[in-house]
Image (cartoon, rainbow, N blue to C red):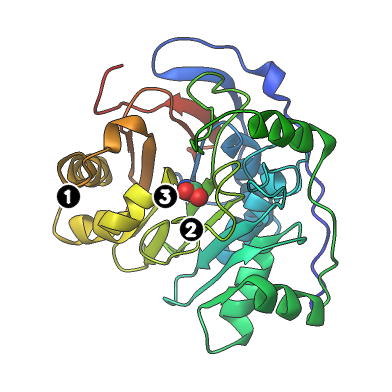
Amino acid sequence: MINRRKFITKALSAGALTITPGILRSASRSFPFIGTSNDLPVIISTWNHGLEANEAAIKVLNNGGSIVDAVEQGVWVPEEDPGNMSVGLGGFPDREGHVTLDASIMGPDGNAGSVCFLENIVHPISVARLVMDSTPHVMLSGEGALQFALENGFKKENLLTPEAEEAWKNALHKTGYDPKPNWENEPNKFHDTIGLLGIDTNGDMAGACTTSGLGFKIRGRVGDSPIIGAGLFVDNEIGCATATGMGELVMKTVGSFLVVELMRNGRTPQEAVEEAILRIVKKVPDHKKYQIGFIALNKKGETGAYCLKPGFNYALYKDGENKLFDSNSYYKK
Ligand code: GLY
């Protein structure tokens, strides 16, 4: 039976964000880590929901938690936020009206856990962690993942909020099948998967990735987020990477593993994520219809972020400051 403490988060409302063109959107604030190192820890995560997630992760480290605890509890924040329509509770359902969740986690020991096509559990990342910590397996799916969660003390909950249900009903009226998220039109409201990477003061790294996937997708569709090497990869000797956006493009290029292997071969995190995006551009013919963003972190605490087209942002906690940045993109519009 797991007994995870309910994590209380302080809301940092999306309305507090001011949209400033250029490298930095505000909502940054000083948030000291209680420790001795100037350079570490570093936490980096995808989209504007990453600001609160980073803050939660740093609090875990400040309270003596491990880097795996930090990445897990960091992503609890968007998972349990009913206003977040791309992760956990409140996520857009599939085209049959069911919210289905994918999540993965990796620790510094190379261990990994994931769940996919999981329903009715607010914190899929914690089920993924339990798969990692307490089984010899990496991935559980669907009914089996739900059974495993319930057997281990997780509670079954309705994840479909009235807002997400209304959006689903509106989507049913549209003709054609076009399940991409709507972040390009309203980037501060709609985002996508949260991927969160961290390195602690010992230089140990971990990552977590969790999503409700594409809104109104075909039932049974699973994206990149629970696929180790696609949506997330951590190699504690080298670095870690995670992805957001149209998961199929990341799966076809094993994106996060590619980023880490590029770092192993000497690329900086920034060079590595740019090369991974270039790989998608070269190898996936219909890539221009979609968005992909990668973030990466290496053993020195250096970071990188890059995306296919404008609109992707990421939250970076470094040197005691937690800030939101606009990522550079391959296409300029
Ligand atoms: N990147 C999330 C998904 O494609 O499901």
Position of 211 relative to 105 (above/below): above
Against 88, is 313 above or below? Answer: above
Q: Is mark 2 on a helix, strand or loop?
A: loop
Location of residue 282 by image quarter = top left
Give the class, few, some or many, for how many residues have Cα within 10 Å of label 1's Cα (few <14, many ≥20). some
Instruction: Measure the alpha-carbon separation of dots 3 and 2.
Output: 32 Å
Q: Which residue is drawn at 39% across and 18% down?
A: 23
- Name the amino acid type tagged 2: Thr
Residue type indicated by callout 1: Arg
Specify the label residue 247 is tagged with: 3
Of the numbered discs 1 and 3, the one sitting upstream in the chain is 3
Can residue 224 be seen here? yes
Q: Residues within 10 Å of mark 2 (few under 14, many from 20)?
A: some
Badge 3 element: helix
Dot 3 amino acid type: Gly
Q: In the depicted view, which residue is nearer to us: 218 or 88?
A: 218
**Which residue is label 1 attached to?**
267
The crowd level at tag 3 (other Cα within 10 Å; few <14, some 14-19, many 20+) is many
Task: Give whichever of 33, 183 is nearer the camera.
Answer: 183
Position of 53 compared to 182: left or right?
right
Circle count: 3
Q: In which quarter of the image is residue 265?
A: bottom left
Q: Name the residue under label 2.
A: 201
Q: Which of marks 1 and 2 is nearer the N terminus?
A: 2
CB within 8 Å, label 1 to label 3: no
Residue 145 or residue 33, whichever sits in front: 145
